[in-house]
Amino acid sequence: MAQTLPPQVAVIMGSQSDWPTMKHAADTLAQVGVRFDSRIVSAHRTPDRMYEFAKSAKAEGFQVIIAGAGGAAHLPGMTASLTPLPVFGVPIESKALSGQDSLLSIVQMPAGIAVGTLAIGRPGAINAALLAAAVIALSDQGVADRLEAYRAAHSAGVAQRPIDSV
Ligand code: RP5
């Protein structure tokens, strides 16, 4: 019987409420054919789950982690402190402070523990997926080919000249 290959990227988030944003990361990974798994892992509400996930992520076969969190967004940094895998952080656009709180919580890491921080919200989620795919593409030619095609299609979709909106 054929073995199912393990997911290459983990898409984790602090809450179900983060999913509408993090779904953009998942959809982008799917578009370029990266295998992924999505999980809710909260640094504050489920710290034991976060610890167990981060400590076992590499052994599970994950190569990259995308972590989205909002407000006091400790999930990406805490996860990065517990795993040798690269972690990309996506600041969720919070209601109270429009994601400024999330961004500053994620980006301002002390030297020595690295989180690659993306833009707030949807653009950050999509770009986190593209960065994760670029890492996977270093050792997966299929993903490299699909990522190149994605980028070419993205460029081809930009018109030469603007048109009046209707
Ligand atoms: C963070 O708190 C989550 O990442 C989420 O962005 C934020 C709010 O969570 P909910 O109150 O919507 O569950 O941990």
Image (cartoon, helix red, strand yellow):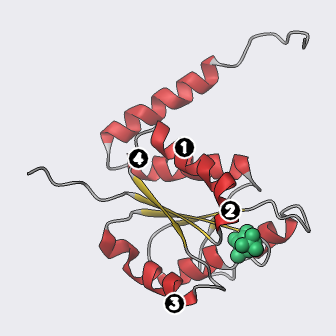
Quarter of the image holding residue 97?
A: bottom right
Q: Quadrant of the C terminus?
A: top right
Q: Which residue is mark 3?
A: 48
Q: Is residue 156 above or below residue 140?
A: above
Amino acid type at circle 1 is Asp
Q: Earlier in the sequence, mark 2 or mark 4?
A: 2
Left or right of 12, for residue 120: right
How packed mark 3 is, by other alpha carbons closer than 10 Å (few <14, some 14-19, many 20 or more), is few
Q: Which x, y percent locates residue 140?
A: 32, 45
Residue at 71% x, 46% y: name it. Answer: 123
Q: Which residue is mark 4?
A: 34
Which numbered tag is attached to residue 140? Answer: none
C-beta proximity under 8 Å, tags 1 and 3: no
Residue at 38% x, 65% y: name it. Answer: 62
The one nearer the camera, 151 or 70, is: 70
Spatial distance from mark 1 to mark 3, Cα to Cα? 28 Å
Q: Which x, y percent locates residue 153?
A: 56, 23
CB of residue at label 1: within 8 Å of ligand 1?
no
Which numbered tag is attached to residue 27? Answer: 1
Q: Earlier in the sequence, mark 1 or mark 3?
A: 1
Spatial distance from mark 2 to mark 1, Cα to Cα? 14 Å
Amino acid type at circle 2 is Asp
The one nearer the camera, 15 or 33, is: 15
Q: Which x, y percent locates residue 34?
A: 41, 46
Q: Which residue is mark 2?
A: 18
Camera sees residue 72: yes
CB of residue at label 2: within 8 Å of ligand 1?
yes
